[in-house]
Amino acid sequence: MSTTRLRIDPDDPGSLPEGRVDHAVLDGTTEADLVSQQRDDDAEAMRDVARRARPKVPNAETRRAMAEADEMMRRGTARFTNAEEMFAELDEAGGQ
């Protein structure tokens, strides 16, 4: 393949080349090239999102509740004996 250089003056239409264009030479990109580039672009976008995303870390109150739930599961015990007790405590906590 060779390179052809042309000087084109946008104000002079006579400087525009005339003739046939060989589209095979003009654009040698294949469908496989496009798919590969799209895959690379998607992977780069995922890396960008991962770099910018803030890690989701539970606050102290949530960590305590999670530890309490883990301990109850380990012991096989429940904090409440029935649903009414649970809802009563939730209502009480909601009023604070």
Image: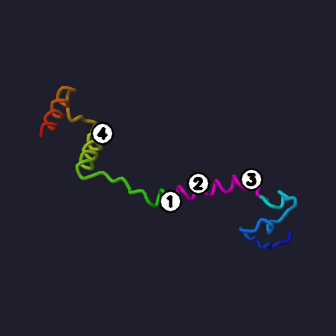
Q: CA distance from mark 1 to mark 4?
A: 39 Å
**Residue that label 3 marks:** 32
Which residue is at the front of the view, 42 or 2? Answer: 2
Q: Which residue is mark 1?
A: 48
Quadrant for the C terminus, please: top left
Tag 1, which secondary structure? helix
For residue 42, which numbered disc appears in the image? 2
Q: Quadrant of residue 85?
A: top left
Label 3 amino acid?
Ala
Q: Is residue 25 above or below residue 96?
A: below
At 77% from the left and 54% from the top, the residue drawn is 30
In the image, the segment drawn in magenta is 29-47
How far across and down, in percent of the image, does residue 64 sit?
A: 24, 48
Comes first in the chain, label 2 or label 4: 2
Identified at 30% across, 39% down, the residue is 73
Instruction: Give the residue pinned by disc 4.
Output: 73
**Around disc 4, counting alpha carbons within 10 Å, would you say few (fewer than 14), some (14 to 19), or many (20 or more)?**
few
Q: Nearer the viewer, mark 4 or mark 3?
A: 3
- How far apart are the alpha carbons under marks 1 and 3? 24 Å
Q: Earlier in the sequence, mark 1 or mark 3?
A: 3
Q: Which image quadrant: the N terminus?
A: bottom right
